[in-house]
């Protein structure tokens, strides 16, 4: 039976007046780990289905906290785990992994990492889009807007790894006096650098998204 959307009500065209509610601390990190773990399940079709469910819950949560709703088609466009761009990228990455690592072929780890990255990017950039980019005043996100946003997010993930990208930098504060020995200094540097990677990735994704938005006509107003 074909699915039909309910007729748009008057509220679908009303203006948004609610302020966004902040997400609970750590929620995006937990959902990102769910996607990475699901990708490692060695059963056909199950990982993609589970990841789509988690992505759907994520986009619903973010839209709701901004006082918006998603049509069923819009939720599907944002939550489906596969896209044409992602398929091309994964094929290229898998080919490279085979060439570089020969018999090791850690494609499961590669897939888990890419799924986690996509989940993190979806949550981060959907939040940024609704808070800073979207100018359309309707409270309903439809399929057309969702598809345009999904394409922009997929392009952003690719753009984030470009050497030409110049994200915002952060300042590392040093103590007045460093009393650590050389080994402790190196260990501290390793630990703190690894802990800073998510923040570095976040800055690259945000900078890349801002560039993609500037080059995507109609994204700010949902292509209306």
Image (tube, rainbow, N blue to C red):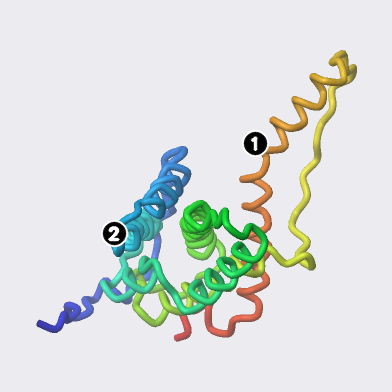
Q: In which quarter of the image is residue 78?
A: bottom left
Q: In which quarter of the image is residue 215?
A: bottom right
| Snapshot quadrant of residue 92 | bottom right
3 or 90, nearer to the observer:
90
The residue that appears at 42% across and 78% down in the rendered structure is 147
Determine the CA span between mark 2 and mark 1: 31 Å
- Of residues 52 and 208, which is closer to you in this image? 52
Numbered label tally: 2
Residue that carries the numbered disc 1 in the rendered image: 195
The answer to whether residue 138 is above or below residue 130 is below
Q: Is residue 188 above or below residue 34?
A: above
Q: Where is residue 24 in the image (x, y as percent from the top left)?
A: 42, 40
Q: How crowded is mark 1: few (under 14 residues within 10 Å), some or many (20 or more)?
A: few
Residue at image mark 2: 46
The answer to whether residue 220 is seen in the rendering is no
- Left-right relation of 103 to 2: right
Q: What element carries label 2?
A: helix
Q: Is mark 1 on a helix, strand or loop?
A: helix
Question: Left or right: where does residue 18 sit relative to residue 43?
Answer: right
Choose mark 2 or mark 1, whichever is in front: 2
Place of residue 188 in the rendered image (x, y in percent of width and height, measured from the top left): 75, 25
Q: Is residue 153 above or below residue 63?
A: below
Query: Image point 81% across, 27% down: which residue?
Result: 186
Q: Nearer the viewer, residue 62 or 154?
A: 154
Query: Where is 26 relative to 215, above or below?
Result: above
Residue at the far front: name it: 103
x then y, percent, for residue 180: 84, 15
The residue that appears at 41% across and 71% down in the rendered structure is: 82
Q: Assign the C terminus to one quadrant of the image.
A: bottom left
Going from N to C along the chain, the mark reached first, 2 or 1, is 2
- Seen at 38% across and 70% down, the residue is 15
């Amino acid at each position: 039976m074909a699915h039909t959307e309910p007729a748009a009500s008057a509220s679908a065209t009303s203006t948004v007046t609610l302020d966004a509610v902040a997400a609970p601390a750590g929620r995006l990190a937990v959902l990102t780990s769910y996607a990475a773990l699901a990708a490692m399940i060695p059963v056909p079709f199950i990982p993609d289905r589970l990841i789509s469910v988690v992505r759907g819950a994520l986009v619903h949560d973010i839209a709701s906290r901004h006082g918006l709703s998603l049509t069923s088609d819009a939720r599907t466009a944002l939550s489906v785990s596969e896209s044409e761009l992602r398929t091309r990228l994964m094929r290229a990455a898998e080919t490279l992994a085979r060439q570089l690592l020969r018999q090791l072929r850690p494609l499961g780890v590669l897939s888990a990492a890419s799924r986690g990255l996509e989940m993190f990017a979806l949550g981060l950039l959907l939040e940024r889009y609704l808070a800073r980019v979207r100018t359309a005043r309707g409270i309903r996100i439809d399929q057309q807007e969702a598809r345009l946003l999904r394409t922009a997010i997929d392009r952003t993930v690719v753009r984030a790894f470009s050497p030409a990208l110049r994200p915002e930098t952060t300042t590392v504060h040093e103590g007045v006096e460093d009393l650590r020995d050389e080994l402790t200094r190196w260990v501290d540097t390793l630990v703190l650098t690894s802990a800073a990677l998510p923040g570095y990735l976040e800055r690259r994704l945000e900078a890349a998204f801002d560039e993609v938005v500037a080059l995507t006509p109609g994204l700010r107003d949902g292509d209306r």
